[in-house]
């Protein structure tokens, strides 16, 4: 398979996405990585678990860093991101499966909320 063509296709797809679509890609990746971490923890694949949780933390950090702080709702969203970052770090260092299972539906709800917002706006 010609990887240059595939890479070019991926770059073109990303470059033509709206900000809202890019945001949803990040949220989808966040939910996917959290699920991957849960599966890895169940299999005792600790390197994959830690890599997946760290990627979740990195995504949350990026989302927090790119918040447009001129809107009042941004402060509330930032507090949510702080909560997720703190709890994901607890999950990572404690290999806490129960806490990860508790967080996953919340991450999915956050993604679904943004999906609704993006669907109803011109983001």
Image (tube, rainbow, N blue to C red):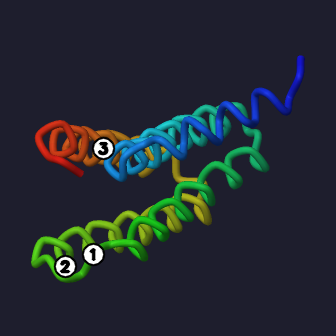
Q: Nearer the viewer, residue 115 or 12?
A: 12
> For the point 60% across and 38% down, which residue is it?
12
Q: Which residue is mark 1?
A: 68
For the residues bearing labels 2 and 3, Cβ distance under 8 angstroms: no
Q: Is residue 36 left or right of residue 97?
A: right
Tell me the tag on residue 48: none
Which quadrant is the N terminus positioned in?
A: top right
Q: Is residue 76 left or right of residue 80?
A: left
Q: Give the crowd class for mark 3: few <14, some 14-19, many >=20 residues within 10 Å.
A: many
**Structural distance between the alpha carbons of marks 1 and 3:** 18 Å
Q: Which residue is mark 2?
A: 75
Tell me the tag on residue 111: 3
**Residue sitting farthest toward the top:** 1
Earlier in the chain: of badge 1 and badge 2, it is 1
Query: Which element carries disc 2, helix, strand or loop?
Result: helix
Residue 52 pos. (x, y %): 64, 49
**Residue sitting farthest toward the bottom:** 70
Q: Nearer the viewer, residue 106 or 113?
A: 113
Q: Give the crowd class for mark 2: few <14, some 14-19, many >=20 residues within 10 Å.
A: some
* Count of numbered tags: 3
Image quarter of residue 117: top left
Residue 49 pos. (x, y %): 68, 47
Residue 58 pos. (x, y %): 56, 64
Q: Nearer the viewer, mark 1 or mark 2?
A: 1
**Image height of 12 relative to 55, above or below:** above
Query: Which element carries disc 3, helix, strand or loop?
Result: helix
Q: Nearer the viewer, mark 1 or mark 3?
A: 1
Residue 27 pos. (x, y %): 41, 46
> For the point 14% across and 76% down, which residue is it?
71
> For the point 33% across and 69% down, which residue is it?
83
Q: Is residue 79 left or right of residue 58?
A: left
**Structural distance between the alpha carbons of marks 1 and 2:** 10 Å
């Amino acid at each position: 398979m010609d990887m240059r063509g595939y890479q070019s296709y991926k770059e073109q797809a990303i470059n033509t996405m709206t900000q809202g679509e890019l945001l949803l890609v990040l949220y989808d990746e966040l939910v996917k990585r959290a699920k991957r971490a849960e599966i890895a923890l169940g299999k005792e694949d600790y390197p994959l678990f830690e890599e997946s949780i760290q990627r979740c933390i990195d995504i949350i950090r990026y989302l927090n860093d790119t918040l447009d702080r001129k809107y009042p709702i941004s402060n509330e969203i930032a507090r949510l991101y702080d909560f997720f970052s703190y709890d994901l770090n607890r999950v990572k260092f404690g290999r806490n499966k129960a806490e990860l299972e508790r967080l996953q539906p919340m991450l999915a709800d956050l993604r679904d909320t943004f999906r609704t917002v993006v669907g109803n706006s011109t983001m």
